[in-house]
Image: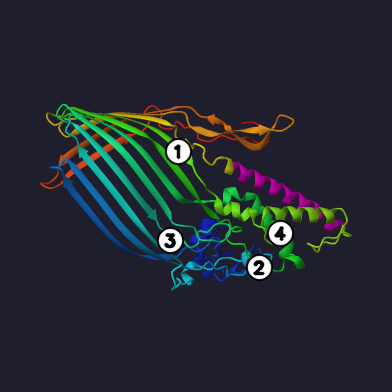
Amino acid sequence: GNVPVFPDQMQVIKNMAQLNSYGRLVGATSNEAAPLDLALRPFLAPAQSGSENDSLSLGWMARWLQDRLVTVAGYRRDATKSYNAPILREVIDPAVPGGVTNPLSRFYELSRNIPLNKVPAVTSTGITRTYGAVYHTPLPGLSLTYNRSSNFLPNTNASAMNPLGEALPNASGQTEDFGLRLSFLRDRLSLSLNRFKTSANNQTQNANGYLAGAIGIMRLLRSNYQTAGDSHFVDMASSYPLEVGGAADVWNYAARGYEMSATFNPSRNWRLALTGSNNTNMLGHYLDGVGRYLGAKAKYEGLETWSNFANELNKVAAGQRSAFFDLDPASSAARTQAAADARSIANNVTTQQTRYENAMALQGMTTARNGKYAINGLVTRVFHDGRLKGWSVGGNFRWRSPNTIGYEQFTDSSGLPNNVINVAKPLQGDDYWDLGAMIAHKRRVSKAVDLKVQLNIQNLPNWQAPRLVSAGYDNLGVN
């Protein structure tokens, strides 16, 4: 026919206008001709948003005791309004089962056809505060520092909701550190030591990985009973965002530890630096929305409700009528379906409950993805004179202590792992070394402009070396 051959769907998409211009698709014979009117129908939710932010900030710096004490204070207030387009599944394809009656079986409308809501979807107000002080003691080269700050990040995404359909709160953070500074040799050598505490609250993350069992159950009930016309599921509302895979939740973290650094400049050509840290990162309260959703005793949702559904379907499979399903126990096909669905729901309930309980067991545990201890070193040589004037070369190294990559599992009566983690037995990775190099060239291109070109190479001996960051068990119980 008159339609060229395209190798894949991307070529079809790129040439859609050309294809549609032919008006019809011609096959090997005239009987195989068909109208040609291709259109894109999005499966993903449209993303269209806008925001307005009003800010007021104030700052104050003061010097006291003949400049020995320097204090700073900052205040900022942000008021943010976010406007979003609604999530619409308006495109109906009769070929899709349930597309005419079930909104979740329809395609999304194009974002360009959906105007922004005039009323803000999210209104957030927050305050950021910062305090700091440096005290230069009467002792030569000794200074003390103190810093404290709190901030927030407004939630501007109205479509980010927990499994209960609730908007997520604003993220916030706090930090406080005490420091000691020493300088020697006319400030060519400096030493510092800091003790810090920091926290990050209501950090938004995708929660689908903690809801796989729940998503599977809801999709089964939707397809096998509501869409199939079971009278007990007529009023089963759209469970957005769970069923479309968009559930989110918030995490809280806390960290404390020490940081030290030493910098030595023996001359203007050389710079040497060494830093180290001791970090204890703790996982705080999290997955509150997931927990409340799973514990809810709703008509169609919640672990207790789903377990009851599995029991009722087992009644049908055994030849008894259920008050929760229209399945006819006299029908062998209905009994077979009931047995399969009961088994699927029960398995998903077990998987879902185990996954959530494993997550809750990690609260208060150390999440040392990069190891508790870290050391970094750096040396740089700058050429100010001679034929190499403007060039710089350097090297660096990083070391990280072994990281936590997972946890052992408890075993069942046969000695096989039972999917329940044992937080008392973390799995450790290996310590990590990284050697790097740097070369740079700087030159004056005008009176006011310098041009610098720099090449950094990380992990010079083997920049492709992987690092193990996660471990688990396969379905045979092998770690």
Which residue position is annotated with label 4?
221
Q: Residue at horizontal 73%, vertical 49%?
A: 346
Question: Identity of the amino acid at label 1?
Answer: Asn
Which residue position is annotated with label 2?
102
Q: Earlier in the sequence, mark 3 or mark 2?
A: 2
Relative to 436, 304 lies left or right: right
Which residue position is annotated with label 1?
281
Identify whether 94 is placed above or below 369: below
**Marks 4 and 2: in contact by CB < 8 Å?**
no
Which residue position is annotated with label 3?
156
Please identify, in this view, whether the residue under mark 4 or under mark 3 is nearer the observer. Answer: 3
Question: Identity of the amino acid at label 4?
Answer: Leu
The region drawn magenta spans 332-359
Q: Residue 230: name its quadrant.
A: bottom right
Q: Earlier in the sequence, mark 1 or mark 3?
A: 3
Q: Distance from label 3 to label 2 (Cα)? A: 29 Å
